[in-house]
Each structure stands twice: as structure tokens, then as C-alpha cells.
Image (spheres, rainbow, N blue to C red):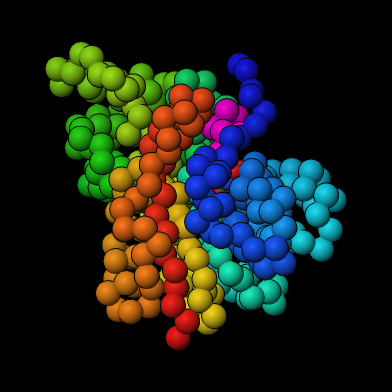
Amino acid sequence: MTLSGEHRPVMLAETMEWLDIQPGQWYVDANLGGGGHTRAILERGGSVVAIDRDREAVLRAEESLLPLFPGRLEILRGNNREISSLVSATGHAVRGILFDLGWSTLQGEDPERGLSFSEEGPLDMRLDADSGPTAGDLLESLPESELERLFSEGDEPLALPIARALVQARREGRLPRTTTALAAFVSGVYYRKGFRRSRRHPATRAFMALRIRVNGEYENLEDSLAGSRTLLEASGGRLIVLSFHSGEDRIVKRRFRSWVSDGGAEFLFRRSIAPGEVEVSENPRARSARMRGVLLVPR
Ligand SMILES: C[S@@+](CC[C@H](N)C(=O)[O-])C[C@H]1O[C@@H](n2cnc3c(N)ncnc32)[C@H](O)[C@@H]1O
């Protein structure tokens, strides 16, 4: 396996432009990851409260970034659904917040985390290795109707046949135990349903659905957007979100629309912004990124 050892920050120029970084002001990077966006804010003179639930991401940034920007960077390990209390406890008034949702290349390339089906690994999928059940635990325990719902929430078209086949396999003691075994299992369901060819791997959506449920991603996003509004509405400020699939983008779009219609926010730009062709050709992971942004109006 080749580890690239880095995560390329997505839409870096666009996020910095729309956050409108001002030297001496504090910003929140709610998804520290490999630290690319945090570093860019710091290099523009801003100060950053950076949050990640992944212990390794936090340790890496503490080693690499903290010594370079003394007094201007605070790194917190936690779930960004608690952004309001985490950031309030630092005592900094923040002028902008950035979300870069999902997982980093560093996490995706680590087979032990079980996020990718191209490498053999355990069915774990937790971004925070210290909390909650793993994907394997869910496959072991959820009833068929819940498994179907889980896959549907990730827009998996064969949610019911996959859930049914998994429950059958569980009864017969042949539940897949690894990433590659699960990918082959889901491909088998597709094949039996008459799907012979597709542009992407048939297990793509099933894996995404499991990751979303294991990490409570939709609930986290709802809560973290609400918490961000609480933080920013006191003195006004910008909220920028990068999402990577339609389920996330739908939540952000609805929430921003409702804030604008209740007079609490203004759109920075009306439609979502996608990465440019050059970025997508250099970093295929950026392809599905969509950026949305609002300005919270002070109350
Ligand atoms: C796409 S990466 C961020 C990459 C980063 N912006 C960069 O340029 O290097 C997403 C990060 O968010 C973290 N994460 C995901 N959900 C989270 C949550 N609810 N709370 C805190 N961190 C979360 C993941 O562990 C991962 O490190």
C-alpha cells in the first residue's frame, strides 16, 4: 500500500477568500484533519481554534503547527457538534467558521480504520477510535428494517436487497468481517439483481452509508450548524461549509435558507460553488466538493 502521507486541502483559495481572513482575528476550523486550511488561515495572519475528533489528527497538528504559530493556535480534540461550548470555553470571539466535512486522505488511506474497500481492513469506520459502535457491530446487531434505513440514508438504491442479504448471511454465520469481504458481498447483490457494469464500484454508497451512521454525521452536522449560528450571531461573522455528497449538502442548503428567511443571515453567494477544473484534475477527491456560505447578521 502507498500512503501519500498528506491531505490536500480542498478549495483552499475559495475558502480563504470567502472567510475573508483578517490579521489578528480568530477563526474556527471545525475539521482540522491534515491542518491545510488551519495553516492557510495562520499564514494570512489569522488566529485559529481548530477542532477534530480524531486523536491522531490532533497529535499531528500539535507537533507540526503549534510550535510555528505560538499564541495564535488552539487545538481541541472533540466533536464539532459541541462547537458552541468548545469555542466559548476558549474565551475568543470568532469572526468566521469553516467546516470541511467527512474524512481526510490520511484516514482513508489507513486500512486499520476500514474506511476504504480497496484495502483489506476491519469493518471499523470510526473517525474517533474511542467512541461508539463500529460498522461491524452495526451489521451484527441491527434488524433488517434498520439496516435498510441506514443504507437508504446514504442514497443506496439497493438498500432493501443488501439489508436482506446481510441478515440472511448473519443467520447462516457468513457475515462479511472485512472491508474487502463486504465490498465483494455488496457487489454480489448488485450482480444478482442484474447490474453488470457501473462507473463506480457497487459498494461505494453502502460504505458511505455505514460511515455516515457509525459517525452520526447527519446529526453532528445539524447540531454543529446550530452551534455555529450561536457563536457568530453575537457580533456577526461568516460561516463556510464544504460538503462532499448530496445528503450533507441538502442539510446545509436547508439550514442556510431558513436562516436567511428568518432574517438571521445573508447569503454570501446564492448557489453552491464547485472546485475549478484544474483543482479537480490535480486532486480527484475535490470533484464532489460543494461550498456554501452565509454571513450571520448580528442580533
Ligand atoms: C476532510 S477532513 C479535513 C481536512 C482539513 N481541512 C485539511 O485541509 O487538512 C475532515 C476531518 O474532520 C474530522 N471530523 C469529522 N467529523 C467530525 C466531527 N463531528 N467533529 C470533529 N471532527 C470531525 C475528521 O476526523 C477529519 O480529520
Q: In the figure, is residue 259 to the left or right of 69? A: left
Residue furthest to the top:
196
Asked if residue 108 lies in the magenta stretch, the reply is: yes
Q: Is residue 59 above or below residue 183?
A: below
Percent across and percent down for residue 160 are: 19, 37
Percent across and percent down for residue 91 are: 69, 77
Q: Quadrant of the C terminus?
A: bottom left
Q: Quadrant of residue 261?
A: bottom left
Q: In the figure, is residue 269 to the left or right of 96? A: left
Q: Is residue 125 above or below residue 216?
A: above
Q: Kindly tell me whether residue 238 is visible in this rendering.
A: yes
Q: Kindly tell me whether residue 185 is visible in this rendering.
A: no
Percent across and percent down for residue 41 are: 65, 53
**How many numbered marks have been drawn onto this rendered protein structure?**
0
Residue at 56 percent of width and 52 percent of height: 16
Percent across and percent down for residue 93 are: 64, 75
Frontmost residue, 77 versus 160: 77
Frontmost residue, 298 versus 88: 298
Q: Quadrant of the N terminus?
A: top right
Q: In the figure, is residue 144 to the left or right of 30? A: left
Q: Read off the magenta span.
A: 104-110
Frontmost residue, 31 versus 268: 268
Residue at 50 percent of width and 56 percent of height: 18
Q: In the figure, is residue 32 to the left or right of 123? A: right
Residue at 52 percent of width and 40 percent of height: 10
Asked if residue 170 lies in the magenta stretch, the reply is: no
Q: Is residue 171 above or below residue 74?
A: above
Residue furthest to the bottom:
299
Residue at 41 percent of width and 21 percent of height: 181
